Image (cartoon, grey):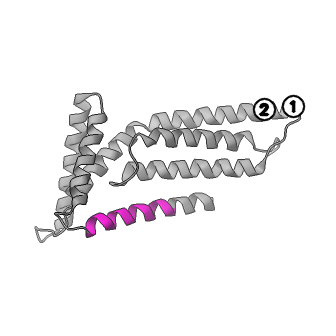
Amino acid sequence: MRMLLATLLLVLLALLASAVYIVAAPADAPVHARLERDAQEILELLPDPSTRVSIRARAEEAAGAADRLAAGSGGKSRFNLRPAATVAAVRLAVALGAVPIYIALLTLGTIAGLLRRDWLRDTFGFASLTFSYAGKAVVSLSLAAYIVTGLSPMGPPVWSLYLFGLAGSLGSCLYFGNLPPRI
């Protein structure tokens, strides 16, 4: 449980650091132009044009809400949150679309680990608690990386969501495959 909480704390710190970096940058900084290009590149990866348009519209709504929130009652803000909010909303939509794949990969890893555990019981193999703890760490780190990729405006490429799913599957297989025969 402590490992999961520590991992979630690291995720929150990474998100906070990227948010502070973007908010502290002036409105004409190159980081904002890069964020707008990133959002467009991510949208171009989607094969369905209607999905692309729908995600773009929701991202623009989120960006407008972020601008209104930053402006407050004064009406004008010195922070330009629109590019960051746009790319974060696009990344979140793509990450939410890939959640079923992530869950399916975790399930496959769990099934493979339980089959290995059953095979160990029938043979003279042994369960390694070290591998079990390492598997738990890999699962929590892959989940944290998935969350950071889905929420942060500046993060790994969105295709890495599949790699994080594979890493979670491997970790789940290690964890369940190396549990002791009697829990």
Q: Amino acid at mark 2?
A: Asp
Q: Quadrant of the N terminus?
A: bottom right
Q: Is residue 15 magenta?
A: yes
Q: Residue 66, percent across and down?
A: 22, 58
Q: Quadrant of residue 96?
A: top left
Instruction: Name the residue at the right extreme.
Output: 124
Can you give x and y, in whole percent of width and height, for residue 9 in the image? 50, 63
In the image, taking residue 96 as reference, residue 136 lies left or right, namely right
Tell me the residue at 50%/53% (across/down). Answer: 144
Q: Position of residue 107 (x, y in %)?
A: 59, 34
**For the point 62% across and 35% down, which residue is it?**
109
Check the image and report above or below for 10 versus 125. below
- Residue at left 29%, top 45%? 90
Task: Kindly identify which residue carries mark 2.
Answer: 118
Name the residue carrying label 1: 123
The type of residue carrying mark 1 is: Thr
The front one of 118 and 145 is 145
* Highlighted magenta segment, given as a residue range: 9-24
Q: Where, by quadrant of the figure, is residue 47 drawn?
A: top left
